[in-house]
Image (cartoon, helix red, strand yellow):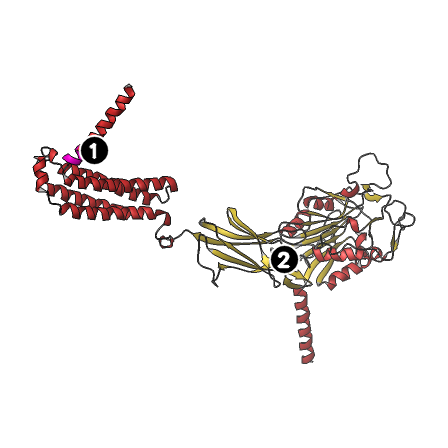
Amino acid sequence: ARLRTKMVEVFDIVARLFSEYRTKTPQKLKLIDAYLLYVLLTGAIQFLYCVLVGTFPFNSFLSGFISCVGSFILGTCLRIQSNPDNRHHFKNISSERAFADFIFANIVLHLVVMNFIG
Amino acid sequence: SFRMASLAFAALLLSGAFFVSADKALVLLDNFSTRETHSIFFDYLKSQGIHLTYKLADDSNLSLIKYGEFLYDHLIVFSPSVSEFGGDIDTKAITNFIDGGGNVLVAASSDISDVLHDLGTECGVEFDDEKTAVIDHLNYDRADDGMHTRILADSGDVIKASIVVSKAPKSPVLFKGVGMTADSENPLVLEVLHASSTAYSYIPDSAITNYPTAVGKATLLIAGLQARNSARIIFSGSLDLFSNKYFLSSVQNAVEGSKKFDVSGNEELAENLAQWVFKKKGVLRHQSVKHHVQGQPDSPEAYTVSQDVEYTIKIEELVKEKWIPFQGDDVQMEFVRIDPFVRLTLNHTKDGVFRARFKLPDVYGVFQFKVDYKRIGYTNLYSATQVSVRPLTHTEYERFIFSAYPYYLGAFSMLFGLFVFSMVYLHHRDDPAEGKKLQ
């Protein structure tokens, strides 16, 4: 009986998480979250392919995988900096500046990726 | 008279030219009567184009080498009992002669001396002691003197190598002399003629107190050797085997009811041996070695890994003083870089061109095309051609690797996703209703 109530509690918490996300999160952040999900899935597919087929050619695998990991990290940074709840942490970084940093870092990342992919 | 003189001079020049081009052999004899008693054999040698110089074995002017060049191509030692060679010749000089490529024919007898004994030992053949003879109480000739030393060896006792002896003689071979043994582990010694299983080697008229040195089929009557530089040596335990008397004699086993042969097989055997030992047959040479990429005519400066190459070598054999294409089916070529990576049997055409077609291994380095052909009775054939094999240049690799397509796709999709996301994010207008909800 205790186990059953525990399971019901967990299910309730998860349901509340989803409903609060749907209602309380600004659309901008949901946009970033959608992009992040896309990047995550692409990265997971590449990793799974490498596990199944083997590491040849290793440089291409690293390049493709790191492009996903790097894009995910930069997307996460953009999300943190553009979340209005974090305004007091990033007082001197406007949202335009955050986006400009995001694009610049992505340019560097993809330059490296294209060189390393072979 | 000027005309006569010039004709004579021309004749002299021509004869000199003939002598210069012929093979030269030095014949060492115990006494000059051997020249007459073995005249059939010597005439045969002359007919094969060998020029003979007869000297006594203890002549003090003997020499095989002068100013670093050998004076003769062959040496015939028909002097079994010589106690010491004269002039510059001794066992060391003869061994030096063999190392220089000279061929030697040695015939001994029961009067064999220490010098010949030593010479045999140098070449891996052990003659039995002085005064011993090969005795066979069941295979001796009817004309024997009672000691049973004039023995018979039939075609089954002859080496079965058609290059050395083309066909075993139909009649038995007469032999009277000293026996030999050779180490069976020695890979260079050929047992050309061995005695029958009932023979043994001992002093004929003394009672046997020790075990004989040579017994049965291990008793060699004629032994041959081809050195690693292809010099050929034949040791015969019997000088009489080459004599006119034995060549022309009839043969009949003393056992009652044996068949009588009108002529012994000695002449036939001696002719075969002379042809082999003086390099008139069983001699190989290679002519042109070519290698190239299949489909291209010339050799490249260096090969690349995994290329298809073709290797050809022309091998010829000396038959009746002419070089004709060799027809061997077991010539192999190795592609070696310290160890062989490829080993193939070469296919050949009727004109003696041996060809191999193969793919280079996926290894780079300095390699050699090696043909190392060693067969009993033939001279050793060795050819090594060095080539470099280089790894692929940068532009010879495939540009896009098929198994990496998902990674290429992933990287480009990241770029595409970034572009789409940026467009949407930048053009996003905050919905005023949502803004109010948050407040």
The residue that disc 1 covers is: A18
Residue at x 72%, y 62% (from the top left corner): B48
Q: Are marks 1 and 2 in contact (CB under 8 Å)?
A: no
Residue at x 71%, y 52% (from the top left corner): B161
Q: Can residue B176 be seen at all in this image of the molecule? A: yes
| Vertical relation: B200 (above or below) B2 | above
Going by the numbered disc 2, the residue's amino acid type is Leu
Q: Name the subunit of mark 1.
A: A
Going by the numbered disc 1, the residue's amino acid type is Phe
Where's residue B171, x and y in %? 83, 54
Q: Is B67 on the left or on the right of B263, as rendered?
A: left
Please give the range of residues in magenta: A20-24
The residue that disc 2 covers is: B284
Q: Name the subunit of mark 2.
A: B
* Res. A118 mark: none
Instruction: Classify the position of the N terminus of chain A by image quarter.
Output: top left
Q: Is B310 on the left or on the right of B85, as rendered?
A: left
Where's residue A35, x and y in %? 21, 42
* Residue farthest along the front direction in this orientation: A1
